[in-house]
């Protein structure tokens, strides 16, 4: 087999990064810095470390066995696949709505058109659906590399310039994290999607197989892990960068982020122009739009992509060559998203908090399934996780489970 260069290897891991770098970074990380300053950098780094094994297990298992994580779940029993379907269906509408509304807010602000957020949502979902149905995996694979590089360069450059400016937060408006109701709720929402929901480990697995189907090449374990690590480290750097930007420009100013999509989008872009200058408006606008639009497309592509094989694994009659399941799931996702945005969305931030909190509570369950799969009998011994990675995964499970139980008890009291 001919040796692949780095650009041919990169793909599924960057798609993973494209799904992760969105609301969690542009919204949650930036708000964290603006509200708490530098105080929660450690939390962001800890979340990235503790969740790392559960995301890494996806490429490790898929390239080692040639199977998707879903097939690994099937080996545990139908209950595991059914559980995944239930968790996915229970979260996908809130997650897709949150991602799409943030994207709609950016479009509305940048183009300055007097169009209701709901209609922007309709337009974005329509265009995204066309791209998915016509372009399939290849277009996603090619576009995400350019988008992530553009956003990364712009963000890091903005942070560097922000450090050169005076940083004198007003003590009257300088808030520190406290273990009260509001701050704990914020923390849960932050960690829920930091760096992302563990659900997308299954997406990553399916993208690897999709690339194999289109290129005829299944990467070696080292190649797949390199692709993943580049994306993972990149998302970690950007999450800290957005926090720093929010802290350096907004912390201690008395200014707060709006919970309205359009207003928030304007404030987000102003963070960059305040550091780089007004000349950078269009560069930043394009980068932010491209990032959120790619996240919207990625999520819209992923849910039907994972639910279709999951359904086929437990319902044998669905195993047909030309199944309509992907289109049916896509239509269901779009309809559900539009219903939430039209009738149940009171504020962008509330929608984001609901979606991220659900992801936090379900994280230990999906993390445990991934651990069971990657240590299963069909996993080649030489490709199984090293002892340090297994220890880290158990520490992560204990932390996520304990914090989830604490949160649920705290909510019920």
Image: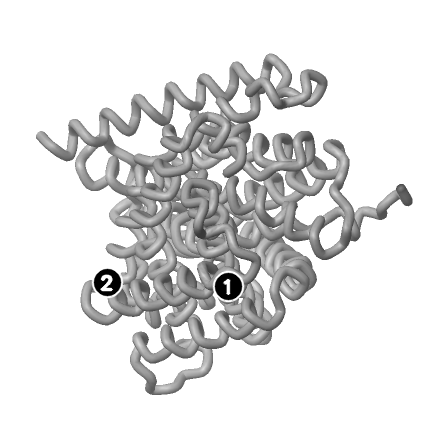
Visible residue check, residue 248? no
Q: Nearer the viewer, residue 214 or 173?
A: 214
Disc tally is 2
Per the rendering, the mark at residue 347 is 2
Task: State which tag comes first along the sequence, 1 or 2.
Answer: 1
**Residue in the image at 52% along x and 26% along y:** 373
Q: Is residue 174 left or right of residue 389?
A: left
Query: In the image, residue 362 lies at what x, y percent?
Result: 34, 36
Does residue 12 appear to the left or right of 123 in the view shown?
Answer: right
For label 2, the SS is loop
Where is residue 340? Give x, y as percent.
25, 64
The foreground one among 241 and 340 is: 340
Is 244 drawn above or below residue 282 in the view shown? above
Residue 49 left/right relative to 368: right
Q: Residue at x 64, y 46 (%)?
A: 209
Of 158 and 308, nearer the camera is 308
Q: Are marks 1 and 2 in contact (CB under 8 Å)?
A: no
The one of 373 and 112 positioned closer to us in this rendering: 373
Residue indicated by mark 1: 297
**Closer to viewer: mark 1 or mark 2:** 1
Quadrant in the picture for residue 118: bottom left
Quarter-wise, where is residue 190 in the image?
A: top left
What is the spatial separation of the Cα atoms under label 1 and label 2, in whole angstroms? 22 Å
Residue at the (57%, 57%) spot, across then down: 321
| Mark number displayed over residue 214 | none
Question: Residue 94 at what x, y percent from top left?
Answer: 31, 55
> Does dot 1 land on a helix, a strand or a loop?
helix
Assess disc 2: are there few (<14), some (14-19) or many (≥20) residues with their C-alpha within 10 Å of its C-alpha: some
Measured as percent of width and height from the top left, residue 116 is found at 30, 80
Q: In the displayed structure, would residue 194 be above or below residue 99?
A: above
């Amino acid at each position: 087999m001919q040796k692949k260069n780095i650009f041919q290897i990169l793909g599924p891991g960057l798609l993973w990064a494209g799904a992760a770098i969105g609301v969690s970074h542009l919204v949650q990380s930036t708000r964290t810095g603006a509200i708490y300053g530098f105080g929660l950098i450690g939390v962001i780094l800890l979340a990235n470390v503790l969740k790392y094994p559960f995301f890494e297990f996806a490429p490790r298992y898929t390239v080692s066995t040639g199977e998707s994580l879903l097939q690994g779940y099937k080996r545990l029993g139908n209950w595991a696949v059914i559980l995944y379907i239930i968790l996915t269906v229970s979260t996908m509408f809130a997650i897709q709505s949150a991602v799409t509304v943030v994207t709609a807010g950016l479009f509305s602000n940048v183009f300055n058109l007097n169009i209701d957020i709901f209609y922007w949502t309709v337009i974005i979902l329509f265009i995204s659906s066309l791209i998915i149905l016509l372009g399939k995996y290849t277009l996603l694979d090619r576009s995400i590399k350019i988008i992530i590089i553009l956003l990364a360069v712009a963000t890091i450059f903005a942070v560097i310039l922000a450090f050169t400016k005076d940083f004198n937060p007003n003590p009257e408006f300088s808030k520190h994290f406290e273990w009260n109701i509001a701050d704990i709720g914020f923390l849960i929402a932050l960690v829920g999607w930091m760096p992302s929901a563990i659900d997308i480990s299954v997406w990553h697995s399916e993208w690897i197989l999709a690339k194999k189907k289109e290129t005829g090449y299944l990467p070696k374990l080292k190649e797949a892990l390199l692709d993943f690590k580049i994306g993972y480290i990149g998302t970690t750097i950007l999450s800290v960068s957005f926090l720093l930007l929010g802290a350096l420009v907004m912390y201690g100013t008395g200014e707060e982020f709006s919970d309205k999509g359009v207003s928030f989008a304007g404030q987000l872009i102003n963070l960059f122009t305040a550091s780089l200058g007004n000349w950078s408006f269009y560069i930043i606008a394009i980068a932010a739009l491209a990032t959120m639009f790619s996240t919207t497309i990625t999520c819209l592509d992923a849910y039907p992509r994972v639910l279709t094989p999951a359904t086929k694994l437990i319902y044998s009659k669905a195993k047909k060559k030309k199944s309509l399941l992907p289109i049916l799931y896509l239509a269901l996702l779009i309809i559900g998203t539009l219903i939430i945005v039209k009738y149940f969305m009171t504020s962008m931030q509330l929608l984001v908090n609901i979606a991220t909190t659900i992801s936090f509570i379900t994280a230990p369950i999906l993390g445990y399934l991934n651990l069971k799969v990657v240590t299963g009998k069909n996993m080649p011994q030489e490709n199984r996780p090293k002892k340090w990675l297994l220890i880290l995964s158990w520490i992560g499970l204990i932390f996520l489970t304990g914090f989830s139980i604490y949160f649920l008890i705290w909510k019920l009291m």
